[in-house]
Amino acid sequence: MRITIITATYNSEATIADAIYSVTSQSYSDIEHLIIDGDSTDKTLEVINSTKNRVTKIISEPDKGIYDALNKGIENATGEIIAFLHADDIYASSNSVEAIIETLKTNKTDAAYADLQYISKNNTNTIIRHWTSGAFAYSKLKKGWMPPHPTFFVKKSIYQKYGKFDTSFKIAADYDTVLRFLGKEKISVAYYPQVLVKMKLGGESNKNISNILKKMKEDVRALRKNKMGGWHTVFMKNITKIPQLFKK
């Protein structure tokens, strides 16, 4: 079972090497790593090219945002399973991919997900927030639940059947996709109860108040589009994050 890991980059020179080494250190052997770069103006490509023997394919050209880049990755993927690792994320251990693939195989599901930790940009050993996903239940979606997207491994055939990222969303297309797959289309999914990915704090959706408000508005649009709720659901979605700050 080949897996394609897609990483979108734009001016990511400070973090991309760690993401690449995180993929190449995996014990699972059949990995295709695609890097979709948005025509970076810093040394991102220089860093990638210095490790290009570790990357299967690099595409660098202007794009219309991160979800456009991820869609290009899906289109170019040859793996049966698709996953996304952001340029400033790393896998929690060398057997992370092997473990989640084994979860997919054992449960014979369309998708699998796991837990995630937000970590400090300056010290990867400092845990800011521990996101314990918990087992899936359809009813949780209407209470704002979603799996951490970097841990969400999905069969490519699901994207082919139900569509890729909706690029009309600038921040919440991943949430829209999760709602579409798990809520509207009810694909089968399994939970791996371990930390799979460590994400450096400071992503696009939460880097300032303006983006947080924009994310909330897009979340509401995604919920309504998929008939899964509205503002009350977004309120619950954000409230449930608070206890995660106290889990280390």
Image: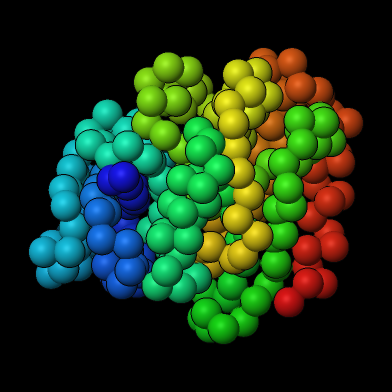
Q: Residue at x 52, y 63 (%)?
A: 197
Q: How is the image coloured?
A: rainbow
Q: Quadrant of residue 112?
A: top right
Above or below, 33 relative to 213? below
Q: Residue at x 59, y 72 (%)?
A: 119
Above or below, 179 relative to 202? above
Residue 91 rendering spot, x and y as whole percentages: 45, 66
Q: Quadrant of residue 248?
A: bottom right
The front one of 10 and 31 is 31
Name the outermost residue toward the front: 106
| Left or right for 16, reference 174 | left
Q: Is residue 211 visible?
A: no
Residue 224 rendering spot, x and y as whole percentages: 73, 18
Q: Residue at x 13, y 62 (%)?
A: 52
Residue 129 rendering spot, x and y as whole percentages: 70, 67
| Left or right for 158, reference 184 | left
Q: Quadrant of residue 26?
A: bottom left
Above or below, 130 relative to 159? below
Above or below, 239 relative to 146? below
